Amino acid sequence: MADLTTNKKVLGWVDEVAALCKPDKVVWIDGSAEQLLALKEEAFATGEMTELNQEKLPGCMWHHTAKNDVARVENRTFICSKKREDAGPTNNWMDPDEIKAKLRPLYDGSMKGRTMYVIPYCMGPIGSPFSKVGLETTDSIYVVLNMDIMARIGTRALEQLGDSNDFVRGMHAKANIDEENRYIVQFPEDNAIWSINSGYGGNVLLGKKCFALRIASYQGWKEGWMAEHMLILGIEDPTGHVDYVTGAFPSACGKTNLAMLIPPEVYKKQGYKVWTVGDDIAWMHIGPDGRLYAINPESGFFGVAPGTNEKSNYNALASTRKNTIFTNVVLNNADNTVWWEGLDKNPPEDATDWLGQPWNGKTSTEKGAHPNSRFTAPAGNCPCISKEFENPQGVPVSAMIFGGRRAKTAPLVYQSFDWNHGVFVGSIMASETTAAAAGAVGVVRRDPMAMLPFCGYNMGDYWQHWLDMGVKLGDKAPKIFNVNWFRLDDEGHFIWPGFGDNMRALMWILGRCKGEVEAEETPIGYLPKAEDINIEGLEGISLDTIRDLLSVDKKLWLEDADGCEEFYAKFGDRLPKEIAAQLAAQRERLSK
Ligand code: OXD
Ligand code: MN
């Protein structure tokens, strides 16, 4: 097959990868409908993918991974900068030459008897000055078909690249899906990613976490922009004006749900609407007017299936009704559709579970779908996709929100005093483990800006980069907030209803951005007055409940400050002085 480009750097790199992996043939992915259709047919024929009911779920497919290959593997993920201290204390590190020497034999000949696909892809809208190109080589049709949903692939990506050498070189090989030899390695200084022995999305769709967060966060630092683990949403008011908000939450804290929320009746009847620009990643640049603008580098959603239903996230479910890949969910043999825990109360009897085994949902005591089973759905399917989704300049950001799962400490919503205090608020972000997940309840995992597994360089330098961006943005900087949907009552029940009702906190946030609503100054930041959170139409929530949700327990916050100090200590002299000063100042305010 003919090469798709004359870019010598691209051709040279593809030759090198082919010489190492030794595939029987090399196929360039041009992204055409015919080529993708032929690949689907091939995957159906080999059993790699299963075609679903084409009347009920047109264009949809089912796939299951190996049992040992169902999630991102943080302990096998490396940031291989030349110097260990440039990866920082929160990343695994190995010397780049050493790890290459260790992994090369694993790649060597791993594609014998297989085809190597070369996928050119563009992260961000084609034609945007903020988009970036990558190439991924892989021996997996599943990867090709997922990349087609998650990124703009094929000839158009190569056209975006032109003769430039500025592309991320991503080398994936399934090899034997051997857990012991699974490695997800980023070389930020070389624009390169090596991923081997996995077929799970987060490890192998290299445009996503590996490039758009780990490599891009490093690029953003060097080039003066930001790559963040953030959703992007727009709130349209009854006059048609849209304000945009980004939000960083650790994995499994409801980013996709917040990004696609349906306003409660009280706002809907006034004409408010919510539009989704992105559900996972935001790339942000300072625009000509000095404001911060965000694009979503992805073109699809790689969402968690279990718990997604008509009520919890109508828009996400609707997004999966066509041209979607389902991974590790239940296959309903009766009508060749899919099911997962939390979809409805009617599990299929004649089914295949995520391991590919016969499964009866009415009698089985085992789960049919893996808890981390996924849908890969085109963003264009989403009923509330923003009309700015393809805007090459992105959308202006009015507010940034941080949030985690905190049973007691963090109030429903609060605003930082200013940008630097907001960076501090992001740096102390944490999420508590739940009884279901870990056993020990309330164990705090620090996850600054929700970037712990995704920051491609020393997190101390990353905080300094945030502080520097604040200086550049000056009074045009977005306002920074923190939210917590997960406060528990004494019986361990969630107090706040969450989901669409989170709009009530977003409306306070927008009110603050516009200077329309007052706040109480507290040691941790500006808090709403209880009566400024709209509770019209909320059952079982009174002003007293809101007061409770907004309470700040100084003792708990001081204890938390000790945890922050311990965490900060790991960074030594890479901890920005300003961040240490913010913690000291907060402690002092709390001790008064
Ligand atoms: C994640 C994801 O793990 O988005 O954060 O898949
Ligand atoms: Mn994520």
Image (cartoon, helix red, strand yellow):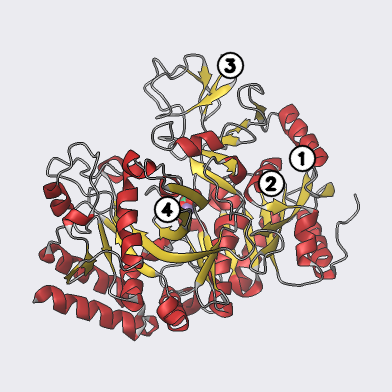
Q: Are dots 1 and 2 in contact, CB under 8 Å?
A: yes
- In the displayed orientation, state which residue is furthest to the right: 2
Q: Residue at x 31, y 42 (%)?
A: 266
Q: Which mark is residue 436?
A: none
Q: Nearer the viewer, mark 2 or mark 4?
A: 4
1 or 4: tag closer to the N-terminus: 1
Q: Position of residue 223 (x, y in %)?
A: 59, 78
- Amino acid type of disc 3? Asp
Q: Residue at x 52, y 36 (%)?
A: 67
Q: Crowding at label 1, few (<14), some or many (≥20) Cα neighbours within 10 Å?
A: some
Residue behind mark 1:
36
Residue behind mark 3:
335
Q: Residue at x 17, y 66 (%)?
A: 557
Q: Residue at x 57, y 37 (%)?
A: 65
- In the displayed orientation, state which residue is furthest to the front: 239
4 or 3: tag closer to the N-terminus: 4
Q: In the rendered view, would you say 361 is above or below 450?
A: above
2 or 4: tag closer to the N-terminus: 2
Give how far apart the Cα atoms at labels 1 and 3 are.
25 Å
Q: Position of residue 357 (x, y in %)?
A: 53, 23
Q: Which mark is residue 237?
A: 4
- Element type where label 1 sits in the image: helix
- Element type where label 2 sits in the image: helix
Q: Nearer the viewer, mark 4 or mark 3?
A: 4
- Amino acid type of disc 2? Asp
Give how far apart the Cα atoms at labels 4 and 3 are.
42 Å
Give how far apart the Cα atoms at labels 3 and 2 are.
26 Å
Q: In the rendered view, would you say 133 is above or below 111?
A: below
Q: Are dots 2 and 4 in contact, CB under 8 Å?
A: no
- Amino acid type of disc 1? Leu
Q: Which mark is residue 148?
A: 2
- Amino acid type of disc 4? Asp
